[in-house]
Image (cartoon, coloured by chain):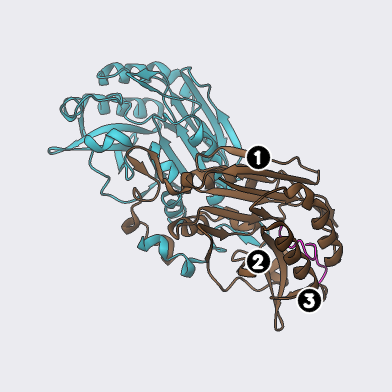
Chain colours: A cyan, B brown
């Protein structure tokens, strides 16, 4: 059994090191978790007034003071973290999430479907939908608004992801929280959606971080506004059984030869 | 405004003409509806003990006593119906749904993703995912277990379907009912899911037929067990606005060049 969970909180806008402290202050609740998912852009906060402001609050991978603090946590607690970060690559910014373990950064995902004014600040992700191996586990990452594109989730299932880590800063009321168990069951994998709480300017973030299992069941859910860590025990073998009935697989029953419009338009 | 709805009931196994009578008995509740969706296999019932039994209870399109009764209803009420029928084509059977109007049958869909023991009885659909025009409206049809394959819904959205008619005989508890509003919002169209009630052998059908709108809102829902007709007024222009925010379209924000795995595996 694998212990997977989320840490839901309200990052402080513009203060990566304060946010590292906030994450550290939740670490006693990580207990013996194997994997903890943190919200989108939990280094910098979300609601930038300009691209210049976002640049000033960015992280250059693989090393930055914020990332080093997270790395220390991974080492101390023998833990993997998935954390949303404002990634700078040369002059370009990406709304990214990193997978980090005791050995450092193992991979990153750059958000493929940008939301609203993110389009003024970040480049669209250019790494596709990668999966990452940690020990016996295959892990995919999606970020926030990616939730509405079932294609993204399906591709990760086809790449044999067992768990989707979903750092979020959700503002549309309740939709993604209802979608997460559906994404889980239609692909028969686990989903750990770590949302943030609080407000920034005119944006209200909706909390209710959710862990869903391959049967479409909600395994844990946070409240709308509180700082909360929730951890569940996940039997990963459930995510490798794609049968929703003894005679129906959500993967093998697909009709890809009839799906070509999806890749063309 | 278009009036669209469902008629939820328990078809009598093995009695197409009794089922035509049952549908006729609900017609006073159709009022001035433009489109009514009926459950899957509402001609024959669902739980065949053998392929031979299903063959004996099939309909040959475009004309059969059952279909003629439905056609009369369309003429009398100036109505379009989508009805699940056990379709015979030569020696083959399809789990089909027909779109019928005052002018007769306008199109049919053959279920692409067969559920459980349907695989012993029906051929997999061989017509892909067609859309149909009625007046100013574009309409798609999916049947029951198709719900779990987001590809099917997406293809119909890419073909500019305004409404998905979803005749069903659902047995998995509550999953599709929760998925229908998500399918609606991720594609920004209307969905009319007409489920059946009652039991056949060891199968319990879960009712709760659902109409969802492009915002992911439930516009109407039936109870689990009662015979019910529900009709809502639908502003079809909402289904043609694919913007979920002023800067995000659920269609145009897609990244099809990165989705190719979906069509390959």
Please give the chain letter of the residue carrying mark 2. Answer: B
Q: Which comes sooner in the sequence, label 2 or label 1?
A: 2
Viewer-side residue, A51 vs B138: B138
Q: Which comes sooner in the sequence, label 1 or label 3?
A: 3
Image mark for residue B55:
3
Please give the chain letter of the residue carrying mark 1. Answer: B
Residue at the spot of label 2: B98
Residue A244 visible within the image: no
Report the mark closest to the observer, 1 or 3.
1
Image mark for residue B220:
1
Q: Would residue B73 be found to the left or right of residue B18 on screen?
A: left
Report the mark closest to the observer, 3 or 2.
2
Principal secondary structure, stretch drawn in magenta: loop
* Image position, residue B105 (x, y; %): 65, 70
The answer to the question of whether label 1 and label 3 lie on touching residues, with beta carbons closer than 8 A, is no
Q: Would residue A122 be found to the left or right of residue B1 on screen?
A: left
Q: Residue at x 69, y 75 (%)?
A: B62
* Image position, residue B166 (x, y; %): 63, 55
Q: Which comes sooner in the sequence, label 3 or label 2?
A: 3
Q: Would residue B116 be found to the left or right of residue A209 on screen?
A: right
Q: Which residues are magenta?
A: B39-50
């Amino acid at each position: 059994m694998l212990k997977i969970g989320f840490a839901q909180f309200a990052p402080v806008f513009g203060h990566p090191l304060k946010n590292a402290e906030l994450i550290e202050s939740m670490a006693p609740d990580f207990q013996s978790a194997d994997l903890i998912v943190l919200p989108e852009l939990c280094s910098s906060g979300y609601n930038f007034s300009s691209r210049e402001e976002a640049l000033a609050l960015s992280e250059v991978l693989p090393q930055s003071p914020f990332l080093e603090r997270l790395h220390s946590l991974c080492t101390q607690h023998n833990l993997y973290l998935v954390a949303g970060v404002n990634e700078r690559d040369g002059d370009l910014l990406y709304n990214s999430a990193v997978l980090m373990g005791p050995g450092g950064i193992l991979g990153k995902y750059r958000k493929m479907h940008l939301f609203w004014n993110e389009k003024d600040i970040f480049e669209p992700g250019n790494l596709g939908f990668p999966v990452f191996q940690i020990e016996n586990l295959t892990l995919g990452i999606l970020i926030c608004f990616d939730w509405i594109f079932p294609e993204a989730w399906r591709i990760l299932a086809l790449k044999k992801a067992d768990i989707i880590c979903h750092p979020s800063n959700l503002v549309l009321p309740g939709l993604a929280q209802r979608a997460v168990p559906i994404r889980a069951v239609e692909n028969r994998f686990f989903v750990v959606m770590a949302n943030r709480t609080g407000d920034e300017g005119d944006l209200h973030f909706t909390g209710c971080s959710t862990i869903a299992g391959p049967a479409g069941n909600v395994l844990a859910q946070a409240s709308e506004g509180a700082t909360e860590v929730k951890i569940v025990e996940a039997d990963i073998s459930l995510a490798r059984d794609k049968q929703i009935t003894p005679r129906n697989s959500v993967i093998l029953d697909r009709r890809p030869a009839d799906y070509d419009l999806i890749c063309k338009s």
